[in-house]
Amino acid sequence: MTTPEPHVQPTRYTVNCLPEDGGLNSHVFEITVEYRGNGRWAVLRHGRCLGSNGEWDYELRPSEREDEWLANHRFDLDTALKLAKQAAPNVTVNGFTVTDALRMATERAEARP
């Protein structure tokens, strides 16, 4: 018997307007695009799922997901990445926008000796 060739499938992408280094805690601003099977992807942020209408909804349990909900919250990869990139500049964390975080990081860097 021959050993089968492993299948490799990317299952998660991270979309973020902040650099991953620089002490910004950029992970709190990230949006993820995650594979959900059958060629469909979800756009997620802190337990919420982006719908085709641009609204964030709580991701339902699999047993509660009806066809209409799935049609509005699952996308092909290109669409999911496009939606995540469009949403990323608008992420706000504790009242701080992406722009605020970038400005504060620049100010800190300029203040260092």
Image (cartoon, rainbow, N blue to C red):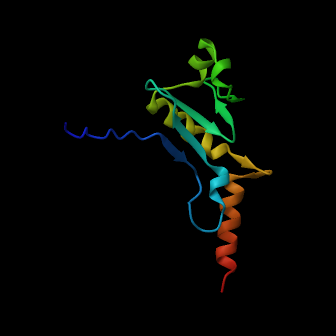
Q: Is residue 13 left or right of residue 109?
A: left
**x, y percentage for residue 78?**
44, 32
Q: Quadrant of the N terminus?
A: top left
- Where on the picture, by quarter, is residue 24? bottom right
Residue at point 63%, 57% (across, down): 26
Residue at point 64%, 23% (across, down): 53
| Image: 33 above or below 93 | above
Q: Residue furthest right?
A: 95
- Where on the picture, by quarter, is residue 69? top right
Q: Residue furthest front?
A: 1
The number of discs equals 0
**x, y percentage for residue 2?**
19, 38
Q: Residue furthest bottom?
A: 113
**x, y percentage for residue 6?**
31, 41
**x, y percentage for residue 74?**
55, 25
Residue at point 44%, 23% (across, down): 38
Q: Of residues 90 and 70, which is closer to you in this image?
A: 70
- Where on the picture, by quarter, is residue 112? bottom right
Q: Of residues 14 and 105, which is closer to you in this image?
A: 14
Q: Quadrant of the C terminus?
A: bottom right
Q: Residue furthest top?
A: 67
Q: Is residue 49 left or right of residue 94?
A: left
Q: Of residues 96 and 45, which is closer to you in this image?
A: 45
Residue at point 39%, 39% (across, down): 9
| Image: 44 above or below 113 | above
